[in-house]
Amino acid sequence: MNGNRFIKENALHLSWVVALVATLGSLYFSEVLHFLPCKLCWYQRILMYPLVIILAIAAVRKDTKQYLYVLPLSVWGMGISLYHYLMQKTSWFKEAATGCGPVPCDVDYINWLGFITIPFLALIAFTLITILHLLLLAVERQNSR
């Protein structure tokens, strides 16, 4: 029961922090380091940036039902991030990378430790937000019984 209380009281704040860090990180890469985002990076931004506002409002209002709005964005973002990461790190989707726009989607602006790229960071952020909101959904369903 203690874990349920922790999730109910902190999941919105934690997921807001994750979304905020991801948003600020993407802005740092593009506006400070001048990395041009590819088409898939833009799609990930379109899904992440609203989460900062949605989750901030939900955290202030303690609205634990926001998973209804957050989960579609975060799950879709996970899918795009995973596809983008696989495009960079495997040969499965290499042909699609060149048709991505002016900036090819398989460009590695960063490659920390040989596997951490910008799409990987986005995948981690979307996954953390999804996990937190699935836990929040489980707690809400358990409390409604």
Image: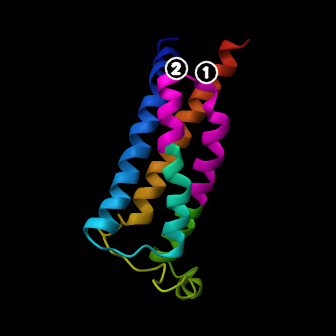
The residue carrying mark 2 is 8
Determine whether the residue tagged by mark 1 lies in a helix, strand or loop: helix
Name the residue at the right extreme: 145
Residue type, mark 1 in image: Val
Q: In the drawing, does residue 124 fall left or right of residue 43? A: left
Q: Is residue 64 visible?
A: yes
Residue 108, position as x, y percentages in the image: 36, 76
Query: Where residue 139 is drawn, which disc sits there?
Result: 1
60 and 79: which one is in front?
Answer: 60
Badge 1 vs badge 2, beta-carbon distance below 8 Å: yes
- Magenta residues span 52-79
From the image, state whether disc 1 or disc 2 is nearer to you. 2
On the image, which quarter does residue 119 sit in?
bottom left
Instruction: Confirm whether the magenta stretch covers residue 37.
Output: no
Which quadrant is home to the C terminus? top right
Disc number for residue 32: none
Question: Does residue 24 sit above or below 134 in this rendering?
Answer: below
* Residue 125 location (% of width, % of height): 45, 49
